[in-house]
Amino acid sequence: MAGLERVRAVPYSVDTGVQLGEAVLLGSQERSYALSVANVARITLARTDVDLAWVQPAARWAIESDLQQPLWAGYVDALDEDEGGEYVELTLVDPVGAVLEDTRSAKELVLQRTAGEALRQLLAEQEAWSPTGLSLGRVDAGPFVEEALKATSLQHGLEQLTAVSPGYDWWVLTRNVGGALAGELNWGRAGRDRRGDVLRSGIEIKQARQVWKRSGLVRSVTVVGQHAQFAQRAAVELLTAGQGKGDVPAVSSETSVQTNGPAGRRELVAVMNQEVSPEALIQRAETILLRTLELAHTLELELHLTNTTVQTIGLGDRFSVSVPSLMLGAGLEGVVRVLGLEPHEEDGRLDAIVTVEEVTPV
């Protein structure tokens, strides 16, 4: 396929991380980068270009790009091969999905520390008896966590930390260091403030699609804790207008919404399975609100991957955007944050999922 010479796959040792063979040209590829999820890739390789040891389940591969895209690395999750076929297809999963998802952690960890400290403890305890192949990269402190972390796997532990840390995410970065792969697990507020850069239709943007859902019309989020006495359960209600009530003072949300009739006043309720402080209830309510709003108004952008601004887009980055043809022709201008990326070097295209955080009246 034309353009695939700008992207290639390279086999690496699962033990030492060193390169096993020459870069392999691809018949096709698709791969994703996203925050706080296990990422997946699919590649097709000519049978004559690979060794059997390279394509067996749990073998390690990296995908390299000539268009400034981050190194993607993962492990073979499945091999699909037809008798007499020219190509084999590999499904790859990143280190979180291939290692942390299937690595059990302590059944219960009672936390009285920041989320960043909890992450360090989880990984350190695991590395002491069963190495994951990951080291810690950037680890921000995050909010103070005061509850029992009931994780069945390290990935589950990460998900629980994310659920009580508004605005925080985890992600894996892999680098080639001296010819060997080195994977880093990161935690914090991902991305850069690049609102001075504008993504414009016809220049950076090839095509845009808007998805705007009623799920973002949230009036309030209520979180209830546990207690031996039903009547003594603590609760907090977070209103999008910033007026709280219950057992804690008012809490201001960064996002406010205008509602439209009874269908536009959603009231979300969550019940925790343990007794926690009012502060912990607030953190959980804020996270639920932010995650709900994050997916309620999104743009699916096809971007020109040969554009230098587009090549430097990273997860979590905030940009200004201008798409005159959206909003039924009224135009959409505002601020967006990058949630997911899928590079397609073969088409000179970068697919991006972004959440609309601010809309500027046109």
Image (cartoon, helix red, strand yellow):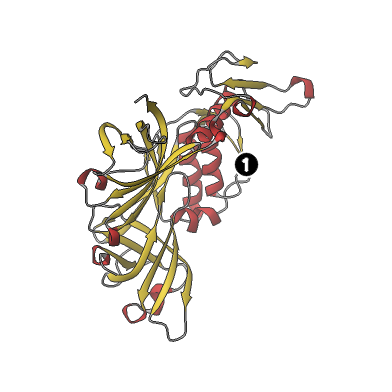
Where residue 136 appears, as percent x and y from the top left, is 39, 45
Q: At 32% from the left edge and 43% from the top edge, which residue is drawn?
A: 314
Q: In this view, does 212 lie above or below 66?
A: above
Where residue 211 appears, as percent x and y from the top left, is 47, 41
Q: In this view, does 65 lie above or below 90?
A: above
Q: What element carries label 1?
A: loop
Residue toward you, 108 or 294: 294
Q: Is residue 347 above or below residue 212?
A: below
Where residue 283 appears, as percent x and y from the top left, is 54, 27
Residue 91 in view: yes
Q: How crowded is mark 1: few (under 14 residues within 10 Å), some or many (20 or more)?
A: some
Position of residue 101 in the picture relative to residue 175 (left or right):
right
Quadrant, the C terminus: top left
**Res 231 quadrant in image:** top right
Q: At 29% from the left edge and 67% from the top edge, which residue is drawn?
A: 19
Q: At 45% from the left edge and 35% from the top edge, which residue is drawn?
A: 168
Three-letter amino acid code of the residue under disc 1: Lys
Where residue 119 appears, as percent x and y from the top left, is 48, 40
Q: Which residue lies furthest to the bottom in this view?
A: 84
**Res 348 quadrant in image:** bottom left
Residue toward you, 103 or 76: 76
